[in-house]
Image: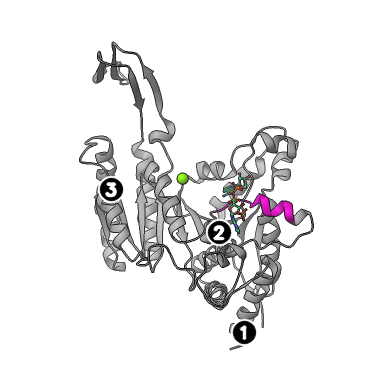
Amino acid sequence: MEKIKMKTPLVEMDGDEMTRVIWRMIKDILILPYIDLKTEYYDLGLVHRNETDDKVTIESAEATKKYGVAVKCATITPNAARMDEYELKEMWKSPNGTIRAILDGTVFRTPIIAKGIEPYIPTWTKPITIARHAYGDVYKNTEMRVSEGSMAELKVTDKDGNESLSLIYDFSDSAGIIQGLHNKDKSIEGFARSCFNYAIDTKQDLWFATKDTISKKYDHRFKDIFAEIYEKEYKARFEAVGIEYFYTLIDDAVARVIRSNGGYIWACKNYDGDVMSDMVATAYGSLAMMTSVLVSPDGKYEYEAAHGTVQRHYYKYLKGEKTSTNPVATVFAWTGALRKRGELDSTPSLCEYADKLEKAILDTISEGIMTGDLAAISKLKSKRTVDTETFLIETGRRLSEMYKK
Ligand code: NAP
Ligand code: MG
C-alpha cells in the first residue's frame, strides 16, 4: 500500500514517562507504516522543558495557532518531588495550563465506548462530552473568615471613582465566612463560542445549565451571554446541521443526564465541570478511555488523552518489566488530530485512516484482547490481558486486514 500523504504538518508535542514510551510504540506500530507523517515536533518532556526554560511549551502553542491542529502526549506537572528527581531549575508550570492560556480554549472530554466495557449507567449508550469553563468562579476566589460583630459588604469602584456598595451579611449574631468570586464577559463569550463551534463540528446537541433562578445576576449572566451569542451567530447554523441548543437549570440537567442515552455536549460552569467530569469518567469505566481536546474560540485544536503519564507503570518499565498500560486514549488523540487535519486539508484518506484505526482498536477490545485496567471491569466471558505492545500489535493486525479488503 502506498503511504497516505499529508498536506500540512501536525504539531506533535511529545511528553513524559510511560506515555512517552507508548507514544513511540503507537507511531512505530500503527502510524508510520500507513502515513507519510509530517509533523512539527516539540519535545515537551520535562528534561527538554527544563533545558529550554520552558520556552518549548510556548513555541508548541504558537505552532498550534499557526497550523491549527496539535496532538499532545501526557506531561509531568512538576511538584517538589519532581524538582529533585529531574534537578529542575524552576518548578515549571503545567504545560496544559500554559497552552490553554495561549490558545484561550475550552477542554472537551469524551469517553471512548467499547463493546464489553459497559458504563455503570446502562442507558448511556453514546458518549457524553463535558466542556468545562476553565476560568474564574471559585478557582480564582478571595475568601475570608469573619469575626462575630463584623459587617461584610461588597464594594466596587468604577473607573471614574464611583463606588457601589452591597451588604453581604451582618455578622452580629455569629462569626462566619465570606467568599468573593468573579468572571469576565470576555471569557464566558469565548467559552460559549468554543462550545457552539464544537457542537457544529461534531454534529451533537449542546446542553448548558446554571442556577440562574437563585443567582439572578452572576449565573444569569452566563445564561444571557450563551443565549445572545446563540441567537446572533449560531442559530441558523445549528438548524442547518439539525442540532439543538438546550438550556435548563443545573439540577434539572443532572436529572436529565442520568436518564439520557448520551450523544451530546454538556457545557458546564467551572465547578460543575470539575465535579461532573470525574463522575462521568468513572461511570463510563476508566480514565484511560477518556479523550480530551482543547478547542479555541477561533477553531484551533489540541488533542490528548485525559490521563497523566502513568508514573507507577513507568517505574516498572524502567526495571525491565512489561506493563499493561492502556494506550487507547493516546491512540484516539492521534486519530482525532489526523482526522481534523484531513478535514481541514480535504484529505479524505487521512480521515478514513482515523476511522479504520479507531475501529481496529474497538474490535480488538470487543474480541476480548485488552489491557489490565479494562480486563478488570469487562464483562466479556473470554478475555485475555495483554501488555501494551501486544495490544498495539493486535490492533495493527486488524488495521492491516481492513486495508487489504
Ligand atoms: P495518571 O498518570 O493518570 O495515573 C494514575 C493512575 O491511574 C495510574 O497509576 C493507573 O492506575 C491509572 N491509569 C491512568 N492512565 C492509565 C492508562 N493509560 N492505563 C492504565 N492505567 C492508567 O495520574 P498520576 O499518577 O496522578 O500522575 C502522573 C503524572 O502525570 C504527574 O506528574 C502529573 O503531573 C501528570 N499528569 C499529566 C496530565 C496531562 O498531561 N494532561 C494529566 C494528569 C496528570 P494503577 O497504578 O492502579 O494501574
Ligand atoms: Mg475534578
The magenta region covers 307-316
Mark 2 and mark 3 lie on one chain; the one further toward the N terminus is: 3
Closer to the eye: label 1 or 3: 3
The residue that label 1 is drawn on is 401
The amino acid pointed to by label 3 is Ile
* Residue at the extreme top: 149
Q: Residue at x 62, y 84 (%)?
A: 401
Label at residue 327:
none
Disc 2: residue Cβ within 8 A of ligand 1's nearest atom: yes
Mark 1 and mark 2 lie on one chain; the one further toward the N terminus is: 2
Q: Secondary structure at mark 3?
A: helix
The residue that label 3 is drawn on is 250
Taking the magenta stretch, the answer to whether it contains residue 309 is: yes
Q: Position of residue 36 (x, y in %)?
A: 67, 71
The amino acid pointed to by label 1 is Glu
In-image side of 363 versus 253 (left or right)? right
Q: Do the residues bearing badges 2 and 3 touch, measured as CB atoms within 8 Å?
A: no
Mark 2 surroundings: few (<14), some (14-19) or many (≥20) residues within 10 A: many
The mark tally for this picture is: 3
Q: Is residue 68 visible?
A: no
The quadrant holding residue 32 is bottom right
Label at residue 288:
2
Taking the magenta stretch, the answer to whether it contains residue 51 is: no
Q: Secondary structure at mark 1?
A: helix
The quadrant holding residue 122 is bottom left
- Estimate the spatial distance between the alpha carbons at disc 1 and disc 3, rounded to whole Å: 47 Å
In-image side of 398 versus 271 (left or right)? right
The amino acid pointed to by label 2 is Ala
Q: Position of residue 358 (x, y in %)?
A: 54, 72
Above or below, 21 relative to 268: below
Magenta stretch mostly in which secondary structure?
Answer: helix
